[in-house]
Image (cartoon, rainbow, N blue to C red):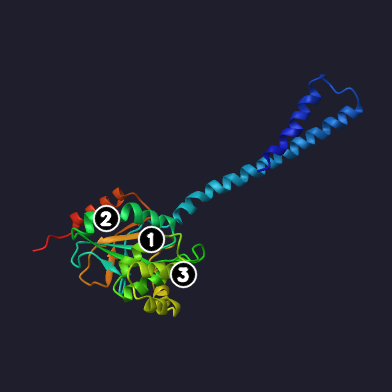
Amino acid sequence: MRITYLFGPIFLLAGACAPAAFPQSAEDITSLRRDIDAVRDGLKVIQNDLDTIKKLLQQQPAAAAAQPQAFKEAIINNAGAPVTGAKNAKVTVVEFSDYQCPFCGRNFQQTYPQIVNEYIKTGKVKYIFRDFPLETIHPFAFKASEAARCGGEQGKYWEMHDKLFANQTALTVNDLQAHAKAVGLDEAKFKACLDGGEQAATIRNELAEGRRVGMSGTPGFYLGLTQPDETTFKATKLIVGAQPYANFKDAIEELLNQAPEKK
């Protein structure tokens, strides 16, 4: 805004008028007229700024109406996605995540272990991990996702998943090879899988599925009742970001109370 431009002429006019009640010469009159013209121009600037503000305020209701609606539900295809927990668990949690994302790492360190202990190990929650590497800001994330999937080919997906999140600052190709060795993978098979990009298409499909259901950042969690069809999942709750465990607990407990009792 240009409102500040006015104060110079206004203060100048006040200073010119203070010493005497009336102008003392033609030169004084000319100077006073210039000051008055400056103030008049400044008032026009203020009026234009006020008109602009008024228009912006009038547009606010329309802008608010254009905001995305609150999450209702999403149908997610989880075919081929890594799963941990009981097959018949009442509640399913789907995490879209990125191995290089610090907020995903925070969730892994602080929240995920509590979900594992209280809900996954007790058979109440089935947990599904979906790869959503943000390549533009996390250059090592995509290859890390491939590495986890290559570990899955040898039956150690979750071991590799945990190793990668525990070492987020060490995700170069050489680091991935070292992590594979540490979790007991066949190094030659792992290297062939990683170097050959065997899992790249799978990760691209994961990204596409995440975007389809509205995912744009990580981590993001979709929660809902477990469906009879193992590959299709209807999410009725969404948690965005590395939220406290209490938020997950509240959402999971609400869903558990909605689940029909098994006969």
Quadrant of the drawing holding the N terminus: top right
Q: Nearer the viewer, mark 2 or mark 3?
A: 3
Q: Secondary structure at mark 3?
A: helix
- The reply to whether residue 241 is visible in this rendering is no
Q: Which of these two is toward me, 204 or 189?
A: 189
Residue neighbourhood size for the residue with mark 2, other residues' Cα within 10 Å, grouped as few (<14), some (14–19), many (≥20): some
Q: Secondary structure at mark 1?
A: helix
Q: Tag 1 or tag 2, which sits nearer the N-term?
A: 2
Instruction: Pinpoint residue 14: horizontal percent, then vertical percent.
Output: 76, 26
Q: Nearer the viewer, mark 2 or mark 1?
A: 1
Residue identified by numbered label 3: 174
Q: Quadrant of residue 79?
A: bottom left
Residue neighbourhood size for the residue with mark 1, other residues' Cα within 10 Å, grouped as few (<14), some (14–19), many (≥20): many
Q: Are marks 2 and 1 in contact (CB under 8 Å)?
A: no
Q: Quadrant of residue 10?
A: top right
Considering only vertical position in the picture, is 18 above or below 107?
above
Q: Kindly report the distance in space between the C-alpha atoms of the residues bearing marks 2 and 3.
A: 32 Å
Instruction: Say which amino acid is labelled 3.
Output: Asn
Mark number displayed over residue 165: 1
Q: Which of these two is toward me, 190 or 209?
A: 190
Mark number displayed over residue 115: 2
- The reply to whether residue 54 is visible in this rendering is yes
Instruction: Say which amino acid is labelled 1.
Output: Phe
Q: Tag 1 or tag 3, which sits nearer the N-term?
A: 1
Instruction: Pinpoint residue 15: horizontal percent, then vertical percent.
Output: 78, 25
Instruction: Pinpoint residue 55: horizontal percent, then vertical percent.
Output: 57, 48
